Image (tube, helix red, strand yellow):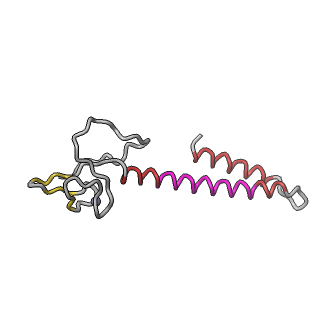
Amino acid sequence: MDYKGLIRQMESLKRNSKSFITEDSDPIWQADVDALDEAMDIIADYEKVTEQLSQMIQKYEVEKDPIDRGMGVYQCPDCSCMVNLGHEHCRRCGRRLGWMPKPKARPAGKTGKGKKKARR
Ligand SMILES: [Zn+2]
């Protein structure tokens, strides 16, 4: 079950618990509703953080070839800033740069994003 599935299930539990709340009901039902709200917030935050981490890894750890403009001039594939031959990262945006010809291995990741074509 993914995060969205977990949240949907917890929403269902919350509706169920809420349906038991009356003026003289056991306070456990309200406590369940409150706990589910907290848990759903934590899951939503966790999902955001893991997405941000994945984007950061793609940018700062996965190499992308600089754009070769000829005559020893290279540009960052993300921000187009001039980059110096051999530098590991773009000094402006931090993009990880790859300089060596590599075998075609796709970086690990669920989306396959971040594999843009170099602009010409
Ligand atoms: Zn850059």
Identified at 20% across, 61% down, the residue is 82
Is 102 situated left or right of 35 in this image?
left
Q: Residue furthest left?
A: 71
The x and y percentages for residue 69 are 13, 54
Is 90 situated left or right of 12 in this image?
left
Is 77 situated left or right of 58 in this image?
left
Question: What count of labels does the image hold?
Answer: 0
Q: Is residue 92 above or below residue 96?
A: below
Q: Is residue 40 magenta?
A: yes
Q: Please report the bounds of the magenta region as a residue range.
A: 33-52
Q: Main secondary structure of the magenta part?
A: helix
Identified at 37% across, 50% down, the residue is 61
The x and y percentages for residue 43 are 61, 52
Quarter containing the N terminus: top right
Q: Residue furthest bottom?
A: 92
Identified at 65% across, 54% down, the residue is 40
Is 54 situated left or right of 77 in this image?
right
The x and y percentages for residue 67 are 19, 52
Q: Is residue 48 magenta?
A: yes
Q: Quadrant of ligand 1?
A: bottom left
The x and y percentages for residue 118 are 23, 50
110 and 5: which is toward the camera: 110
Identified at 73% across, 52% down, the residue is 15
